[in-house]
Structure formats: structure tokens, C-alpha cells
Amino acid sequence: MEALAAALDARERETGLHSKRVACDTLVLAKHFTTDARQLRQVYWGALLHDIGKIGIPDAILLKDGELTESEWQIMRTHPDIGHRIVSSASFMADAARAEIVRQSGTQFDPQAVAIFVAEEATLRGMVELKCGAAHADMLRAGHGGFNAGDC
């Protein structure tokens, strides 16, 4: 999984270790909700591969300098579906799909947290679409590189 994320990060020259930072940030938060190693591993892998569908986005769009056109954004917005197709074939990633989170509401996951997750899905997708670029750029300018793998 880390090799796939590293391949994406290498292709997308602006993000550096973006996938690893997102995975570590998410893992730190997830540890507040569970101590189950299997669940934490699923959360980490899911977060690590959150942008893996960008592998299927043409370089002319993914690596474009400047603003994307509306038609280019339409193509960029397909990366979560491409990513889902990539990871859904991996049986060990089954628990990292959205449907599993909703299905386990009230059993493995706090129903209030799941409701918030579902209610904020559009916001979360928007953040992915923007690649969290502004937030990470601000963090890097301020000298905060996020978490390193060892910090997880």
C-alpha cells in the first residue's frame, strides 16, 4: 500500500509526502475512537490511498500548472471512483469502503460520528478535490510538515 501511495506522490510533484501525512493525521485521530489494531490498520490504509485514483487522471490535467477548466475538473472529480475500483479488488481493503462505515454504525462505529461523516461527505470530497493544497502549503510555510511515519 505504501508503495502505491509513494508512486502517486512521486507522480504528483507538488504533494511530496501528502498521502503519508494524511494517513498519519487520520491515524492519530482514529486512535481516539478505537484501540483495535485491525481497525486502525484499515483506517491507515484507507487514508493512505485516499487519492490513489489520481493514477488514472491524465498528466495534462493532474500536473497542469494553473487553474483547471470546468471540463478538466469533471475529469479530476472521477479520481475517487477510479480509486474505489482500484482498492475494491483488494480483499484486505474491504473495511476501508464508505459502505462499511455506514453498515457498522452503532456496532463498530459511533452513530454520531458516522452521521457527521455522512453529513460532511461533500465537504470532505471538496477537500480532496482541492488536495488540501492551501492548508498544506500554509503548514509548510509555517514550518509544520505534518506527521512523519514514525509519529503515527
Image: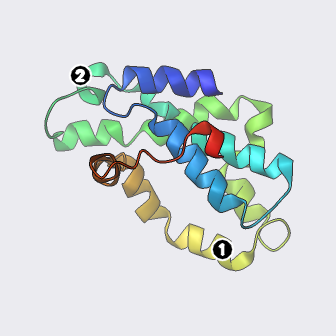
Give the image location of residue 42, x and y in percent.
74, 45
17 vs 135: above or below: above
Judged left or right of residue 79, residue 25 is: right
Inspect the image, locate mark 1, and give the three-letter code of the amino acid beneath it: Ala
Judging from the image, what secondary structure is the residue with disc 2 in? Answer: helix
- The front one of 32 and 89 is 32
**In which quadrant is the N terminus drawn?**
top right
Using a 10 Å C-alpha cutoff, classify the residue at mark 1 as few (fewer than 14 neighbours), some (14 to 19) or many (20 or more): some
Give the image location of residue 60, x and y in percent.
23, 22
The image quarter containing residue 93 is top right
Residue found 39% across the figure and 20% down from its top: 11
Say the numbered circle drawn on residue 113: 1
Question: Which residue does the numbered mark 2 point to in the structure image?
Answer: 60
Residue found 67% across the figure and 79% down from its top: 112
Say the numbered circle drawn on residue 126: none
Using a 10 Å C-alpha cutoff, classify the residue at mark 2 as few (fewer than 14 neighbours), some (14 to 19) or many (20 or more): few
Residue found 54% across the figure and 37% down from its top: 20
Give the image location of residue 50, x and y in percent.
54, 42
Judged left or right of residue 55, residue 143 is: left
* Mark in the foreground, 2 or 1: 1
Residue found 62% across the figure and 45% down from its top: 151
| Alpha carbons under labels 2 and 1: distance apart | 38 Å
- The front one of 147 and 73 is 147
- The front one of 58 and 40 is 40
Judging from the image, what secondary structure is the residue with disc 1 in? Answer: helix
| Residue lying at the far bottom of the rendered structure | 112
Q: Earlier in the sequence, mark 2 or mark 1?
A: 2
Give the image location of residue 125, x and y in percent.
43, 55
10 vs 28: above or below: above
